[in-house]
Amino acid sequence: MSKVKSKRFGLLISIFVICMILAGCGAEESGASSGSGGDDTLTMLVSETADTPGFRAVVEKIEDELGIKTKVEKRPGGPEGENIVKTRLATGDMADLVLFNSGSLLMALDPGKHFVDLKGEPFMDKVMDSYKEVVSKDGQIFGIPAKSSQVGGWLYNKKVYKELGLSVPKTWDELMANNEKIKAAGKTAVIGTYGETWTSQLPILADFYNVQAEVPSFAEEYTAGKAKYASTPEALRGFERIQEISEKGYMNDDYNVASYNQGMKMLAEGTGVHYPMLTQVLPLIAENHGELVNDIGVFPQPSDDPEVNGLTAWMPDAIMINKESKNVEKAKKWLEYYISDEALEVYTSKEKAIGPFVLKGVELPEDSYPAVKEMTPYFESGNVAPALEFVSPIKGPNLPQICTSIGSGTMKAEKAAKMYDEDVEKQAKQLGLDW
């Protein structure tokens, strides 16, 4: 080898070594290793989106108060992350603590096989029954809530409501009457942001409180392949409501291309008055539009009966203990502290909740978003139901596209419901359900 080649080879080796060192530093910083983290350390696998300032602040507080370090390892979200969790559980390579979805996705993991039953732990008395339902199977309870709940409903501009003399509607007809007055005032009554198709499905997803109130067996029969959207009038109403909004011209002219960010801007500034959406949008409105977030409220998707009026809730992810962990008792102390009043105070000092906490006796801070304060009475009175995806493993992947077709006027509600039933059937068969 010539001297020149020798020097180049040496340079490449040096670069390779530096890259490996830097890569190693990145992995160490994010806590990339798995298995036991040492006598005073618990390992924890979380999704990337769960690693928030509030979560990190509590983790640090646990180290200060309990002397338990937490080595956090992040995974992708969505199907890729779900497959990582499934693979690591199957191969016995799971962390001590696991942060994962509650509801149907958790049930698909066979939680009794992989996670510690927390039913007899005194600290579980603090967790609301409505949350226990989405982390329980066969009489066992597997997780605590990782953060606050959120709801899907109708976000509205309270300032415009006051200007136009409107009241929060209790029925669908009252909502349509409000829409008519808003339209007459020259404003957009219903914000559509089909440029991001997932936003189109909220009028159906948020309608589930009404469906389960009127047909309590719907989720069970739907999962068994016996109940269908097209043949259940109460479930079909969600599709019909999108059609009605479209036919009456309540949406913004550019609804087919408008983005999520544009929808937020319209709502915050009051050029659009209603936005069917998840309350996860609140921190983004606060970040991009400051104090205008205080003009935003939320109400449930109204039914046809004023006596049926409640919120459809998206329950928080769960934190669970790996059954194979050698640190189960230490992990239980970690969980107990995580939902303590002290920990919640730390959490809310770093990030505001997007819904009530599903913990008993926990009051929201005074500086909570006004929309979140509006949700609280529904939770306290029990007028809340988990979204369908928390009580059934089946959700057709093409619902957003089907909803945009209705909203765009290219498909009628009844045909859309039949198409969605077919979409759901394909998914059920992929899940191995006996349909």
Image (tube, grey):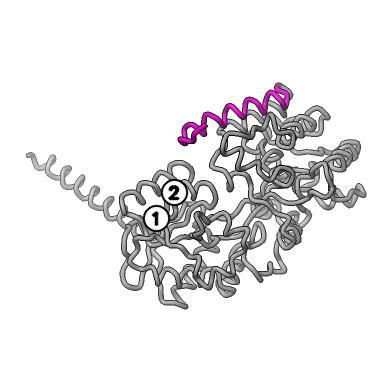
Q: Residue furthest top?
A: 410
Count of numbered circles on the image: 2
What amino acid does circle 1 point to?
His
State whether residue 361 is above or below residue 201: below
| Disc 2: CA contacts within 10 A as few (<14), some (14-19) or many (>=20) | some
Q: What residue is drawn where x is 40% and y is 73%? A: 68
Magenta stretch encompasses residue 259: no
Residue to which mark 2 is pinned: 109
Q: Which percent across, then down, holds residue 152?
A: 68, 47
State whether residue 398 is above or below residue 319: above
Q: What residue is drawn where x is 42% and y is 62%? A: 116
State whether residue 346 is above or below residue 155: below
Residues in magenta? Answer: 411-435
Q: What residue is drawn where x is 23% and y is 52%? A: 17
Q: Relative to 178, is 280 on the left or the right?
A: left
What amino acid does circle 2 point to?
Leu
Q: Relative to 107, is 126 on the left or the right?
A: right
Residue to which mark 1 is pinned: 114
Q: CA distance from mark 1 to mark 2?
A: 8 Å
Helix, strand or loop status at disc 1: helix
Q: Which percent across, then down, holds residue 397?
A: 55, 33
Q: What residue is drawn where x is 78% and y is 50%? A: 309
Placement of the N terminus among the 4 image quadrants: top left
